[in-house]
Image (tube, grey):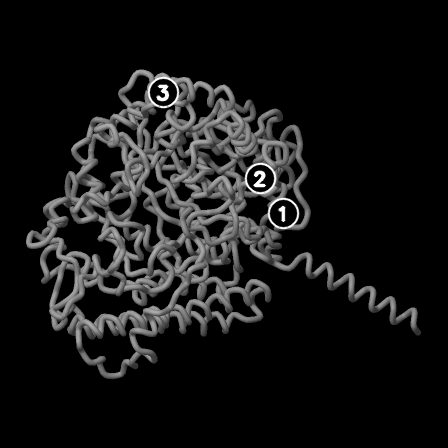
Amino acid sequence: MWRILLTILSALLVFGVANQACAEDGYQLWLRYQPVDSAQKMRVEPLVTHYVGPSGNATIDAAMDEFARGLKGMIGTPPVRRETVMGDGAVLITTAASPLLKGMALPFDKLGKEGFLIRSATVSGHRVTIIAGNSGGGTLYGVFRFLKLIQTDQPIDRLDILDAPKLQVRVLDHWDNLDRHVERGYAGQSLWDWQKLPLYKDPRYTDYARANASIGINGVVPNNVNGKAEILTAEWLEKVKALDDLFRPYGIKVYLSARFSAPIELGGLKTADPLDPVVIAWWKAKVDEIYRIIPDFGGFLVKANSEGQPGPADYKRTHADGANMLADALRPHGGIVMWRAFVYSAENAEDRHKQAFTEFQPLDGKFRDNVLVQVKNGAIDFQPREPFHPLFGAMPRTPLMMEFQITKEYLGFATHLAYLGTMWEEALEADTFRPAKGSTVADVIEKPVDAGAVTGMAGVANIGSDFNWTGSQFDQANWYAFGRFAWDPQSSADDVARDWAHMTWSNDPAVAEPIVRMMIGSREAVVDYMTPLGLGHQMATGHHYGPGPWVSELARPEWNPTYYAKADANGIGFDRTKTGSDALAQYAPQVAAEWGDLKIVPDRLLLWFHHVPWDYRTKSGRTVWDDLVTQYDAGVDYVKRMQAQWDRLKGKIDQRRWEEVRDFLAIQRKEATWWRDASIAYFQSVSKRPLPAGHAAPPRDLDWYKAIRTPYAPGRGE
């Protein structure tokens, strides 16, 4: 009897351990490759009996490894690799140069270097599926697309897919410091364990590369734009080389943030003047050294003359002078410069919204064609909502690349559910009216300014050492969405969210569709409870955690939330019309006419461009004061609805991830309520208006909210 009980107990323990090992934690991201249902399995198995591909190409090998991994997870047994087609069901994982494709007249001329085709065809009398590109990288992207079709329960029997990226450079910018602290990072330490590199290469680096390749990201900047010059020394370049070697099979190049003053700090020079021949020679020698160590190095990302960083203006030179000096050093090696347009100065009294345009627009046409001017989606700083940056469309002779922030510095960090695909879609589909109606921001960044110019998009990464990579399950969606929008800026935020939900959570529509609905309205909810009606930068000091609309004592005017709201007894909002800063004049006349006219400006941008009385009527028919309160409450109410929706999914999602999201939604509701209460308390103290009927008063007085201190909030700078 005791033996029987021990046997049962042992079995239960083993079963329990196995179950724990298989418990979902988010590490696999959207590449979970869970078993498909029986109907999909029956459809897939006859079409993937074996796979064929050339040997000796590291990227094709990576593609075939991923193919086998995916199929093993989804149908249980991986297809066998063969040297040639042996019956129906072969999948050809190859390139345009393959002898197997000879005479098939496939449209590789439409694919460019990184595009791919997936086609159902007949080879040697057998029914096969071809996955191929002009390069191994294109083929790898094709394999990930093929696996996604199976993951999302799509048919694979009659395929004819051609796809290619619309942007050449699709890069993640990591704001990671060499001590592993991540500026504006909410997912643990830096992924890069520099102390152990180059001799120990964490397997996570390969999984990171796989995830990026699956969404078409082809570049990584591992160090912070506010970082140190040491990254350019030989010792550190060997560490960077170790990462580059791991990333190369996945089509990913490594770039580095270069500190403009490196010739002084590393070279012992007395100047970093970009027109000084000695400085030019130093950078040329440094670039040559980098390429000896890392032959496929991508180039430099530079933050200059912004927030105290050194730059060409220190020597009375222009941004073009600085960027071109580096571009000339990189050109013989095929490298590029990504020069950030995020600039503002404490000494400049001009509206911060205007400063980047003022500095960069007159330089149109003066940058080398291997320079990309990297422009944020809005003119201030990654706010929950901003109008599109006026530089888009205003520099037709200069390559511009979009910079999005994937890490949620101003949108509730990792704990608030805020899907950013809708924000990015809003920015990309905005009409610049330059040169004419219908010229969207997406069009501007997609079209090369000339035959040799580069195109691109950058995203400030939200990745760290947390086991789920991004600090929360739903923040993975923003990493995924960035890759999709970088591949195709015309993407649909709704479609991207749906694909991610199906791959990450479940193919069951009863699970995926409610999740998609939560996601699509989530960013708007954050706008509502943080910065409604066009308010901006109302966050507390330094860490940007929690509300601080009353903050006014900081040294630089543009650091203070009161600078942006300009709330007084008479009204609220920043006048950027002709009677104010006239920032609207930086946009095309058609845009300025719409946003500058109180009769037609959308309520969502009202206070961004206009200072209006508290009793001004918005499009809703409510007064500005009543509408502000209504929007604050709407944001909190949306979080409550997300909580209720998530509760209904209990039992339909693995327990560990379900509980994490449940708890994070509770944090979001608490903090959204804090935002609502503190903001109303402050603005009511200024406006002296009663609350509209049906809206509760904040439970504490204003002084109580002002007294809140959060000195250890994550994500601070160095």
Q: Which mark is residue 329?
A: 3
Q: Which mark is residue 533?
A: none
Q: Does 621 sit above or below residue 146?
A: below
Return the x and y of residue 111 as percentages of the image width and height.
40, 31
Identify the image quadrant of residue 65: top right
Q: Label 2 belongs to which residue?
A: 206
Element class at badge 1? helix
Label 3 neighbour load within 10 Å: few <14, some 14-19, many 20+: many
Is residue 142 or residue 84 the one in the foreground? 142
Callouts 1 and 2 close, C-beta under 8 Å: no
Is residue 15 or residue 415 the one in the foreground? 415
Q: Earlier in the sequence, mark 3 or mark 2?
A: 2
**Gap between marks 1 and 2, in whole Å?**
28 Å
Question: Comparing marks 3 and 2, which lies closer to the viewer?
Answer: 3
Residue furthest left as drawn: 579
**Gap between marks 1 and 3, in whole Å?**
53 Å
